[in-house]
Amino acid sequence: MFFFHPADLLMIPAILLSLWAQMRVKGAYAKYAAVRTQSGLTGAEVASRILNGARIDNVAIEPIPGELTDHYDSEKKKLRLSQSIHSGNSIAAVGIAAHEAGHALQDAQNYGPMRLRHSIYPLASLGSSLAFPLIFIGLIFNFSFAGALIQAGILLYTAAVAFTLLTLPVEFDASRRAVAILASTGQFSPDEMRGVRRVLSAAALTYVAAAAAAALQLLRLILIAQRRR
């Protein structure tokens, strides 16, 4: 049965890792969102200084609703920060804002992994939407072309997995840039920088967990397809 295949057990470690990563990032964020930096700089001010220092003048910084909804939009050249990060002057706000500014620097410098990830996004998005319906139809119904549907679904999902894996170097590099830039300013104490690293390290775990879950899901689908044959 599709829903009770032994390969489903592969998802247990992925789920546990995801839950652990979420706990880590929420814990680190809650801790360091309550600690104000000595400089008093807000996340928006830190991001603006990083962009100005890199002579990037075509990226707008704007607040958005939600918590931990921060992201950089390379299409519209907008660095969007959640309200608590945009206007906050905590260690968490500074670290997260600097991380997102790191993505803007990657974009300006044509960072390879970011470009590659962007190029496969349309196919990855299609794979995320169509892979499971195709595989489900191929497994449930005994069409003559059911096997072809399953293979097409697996290939599409492979593109989605590739996108998730490419996210890792992009995110790790953005955090590396953020830490290096903040440390170079001399405006943040060693304790503050330690907090920044912990926040960004915890956030990185969520991407690792997502990549692991995607890879294990792909393996699960392959094993289910093999058994059907």
Image (spheres, rainbow, N blue to C red):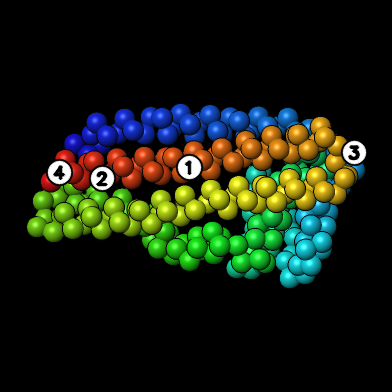
Classify 10 Å Cα crowding around label 4: few (below 14), some (14-19), many (20 and above). Answer: few
Tell me where residue 91 appears, x and y as whole percent: 78, 39
* Mark 3: secondary structure: loop
The reply to whether callout 2 and callout 4 are in contact (CB within 8 Å) is no
Q: How many residues crowd around disc 3 within 10 Å: few (fewer than 14), some, or many (20 or more)? A: few
Task: Identify the mark nearer the N-term, 2 or 3.
Answer: 3
Residue drawn at (71%, 38%), measured in percent from left and top?
197
- In 3D space, how far apart are the residues under numbered discs 2 and 4 (Cα atoms)? 10 Å
Indicate the amino acid at tag 1. Ala
Q: Mark 1 to mark 4: distance in Å?
A: 27 Å
Q: Secondary structure at mark 4?
A: helix
Q: Is residue 101 left or right of residue 23?
A: right
Query: For the residues marked 1 and 2, what is the alpha-carbon distance in whole angstroms?
Result: 18 Å
Q: Are marks 1 and 3 in contact (CB under 8 Å)?
A: no
Instruction: Name the residue type under label 2.
Output: Ile
**First in sequence: mark 1 or mark 4?**
1
x and y percent of residue 163 in the render? Answer: 46, 55
> Disc number at residue 228?
4
Q: Residue at x 15, y 55 (%)?
A: 146
Residue 58, quarter of picture: bottom right
- Residue 222's disc is 2
Residue that carries the numbered disc 3 in the rendered image: 38
Q: Could you tell which of marks 1 and 3 lies nearer the N-terminus? A: 3
Q: Is residue 24 left or right of residue 125?
A: right
The quadrant of the picture occupied by the N terminus is top left
Q: Is tag 2's residue or tag 4's residue first in the polypeptide sequence?
A: 2
Q: Which residue is mark 1?
A: 210
